Amino acid sequence: MAVQLALRDIRKSFPVKTGRVDVLGGLSFDIYERDFVSIIGPSGCGKTTVFNVIAGLLEPDEGEIEYRGERVDGLRGKVGYMMQRDLLLPWRTVLQNVLIGPELAKMPLGEARDMAMEYLNTYGLAGFENAYPRMLSGGMRQRVALIRTLINDPDIILLDEPFSALDYQTRLYLEGVLMEAVETFNKTVVLVTHDIDEAVALSKRVVVLGGRPSHVKKIYDIDINARTPIGARSDPNFAGYFHALCGELDIQTEVA
Ligand SMILES: Nc1ncnc2c1ncn2[C@@H]1O[C@H](COP(=O)(O)OP(=O)(O)OP(=O)(O)O)[C@@H](O)[C@H]1O
Ligand SMILES: [Mg+2]
């Protein structure tokens, strides 16, 4: 399998009152072409920081990033990044928010609008295209932010807790939509989630971060070939991975 994105010994610290706090302590892992990798780890371990480094929004103190074998300073322009906070522009409607990327890319407006409306329909937002972000629920805003990321058709998609504000039913539905889209359009996805169940159901591989400063504790290959999120959760291998990953995060799964 060809490596698409490689992180090599990435270190990052931030200034605090008493000096500096080391957050990433030499992080290395590879992401393959058409991979689906989830990153899990305790709150505050640096998952969002890794994404900011990959996206080129933060410079690492040390370490290298390679994209298809070439050293780069971050993947600005190559990645679609759905941030943990949705960052919709409050003065733009849903449709106008979704069209930011196509506008910047100078895509023909009619074509972009048709595509946007199709996405809004698939993601259960038909009829809300002229609403403003303040009029939407948290889950609806999250869906708009996801569409805004996908519509630009990036090579690599970084999703930071994209489904956290959704009810379970909508989450399952959108997990399915994402799985299908990734499969159809040959995308590479890196997903940060606190939901182990979701990481196992969607991913080909799961990267576990831990320690302070954090490093890659373990990488699991997930041998589940289901085509839907529910199918994956019903796979005979699902429970084994789920328990192993709970163990990695020190979550007790046995009732005493
Ligand atoms: N710009 C910054 N300045 C100072 N400290 C920061 C900055 N960004 C992140 N940190 C610190 O780095 C650590 C990791 O933050 P990060 O947001 O990457 O964690 P996370 O794993 O995404 O957590 P969560 O699961 O809660 O989203 C935290 O201790 C945070 O306070
Ligand atoms: Mg985070």
Image: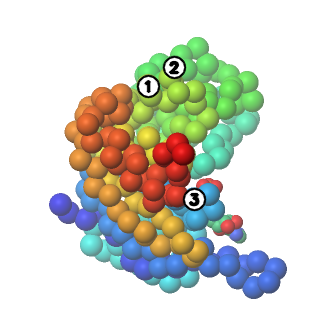
Q: Nearer the viewer, mark 2 or mark 1?
A: 1
Q: Residue at x 44, y 28 (%)?
A: 172
- Given the current orientation, which residue lies at the most extreme right position? 17
Q: Residue at x 43, y 80 (%)?
A: 9
Is there a contact, CB below 8 Å, between mark 2 and mark 1? yes
- Given the current orientation, which residue lies at the most extreme left position? 1
- Residue for badge 3: 42
- Residue for badge 1: 173
Whether residue 184 appears in this view of the structure is no
Image quadrant in which you'd find residue 213:
bottom right
Image quadrant in which you'd find residue 71:
bottom left
The Cα–Cα distance between marks 2 and 1, rounded to whole angstroms, is 10 Å
In the image, residue 53 sits, relative to residue 99, either above or below, namely below
The Cα–Cα distance between marks 1 and 3, rounded to whole angstroms, is 26 Å
Mark 3 and ligand 1: say if the CB distance to the nearest ligand atom is below 8 Å.
yes
In the image, residue 37 sits, relative to residue 13, either above or below, namely above
- Residue for badge 2: 124
In the image, residue 68 sits, relative to residue 109, either above or below, namely below
SS for callout 1:
helix
Mark 1 or 3, nearer chain start: 3
Q: Residue at x 47, y 19 (%)?
A: 121
Whether residue 222 appears in this view of the structure is yes
Mark 2 or 1, nearer chain start: 2
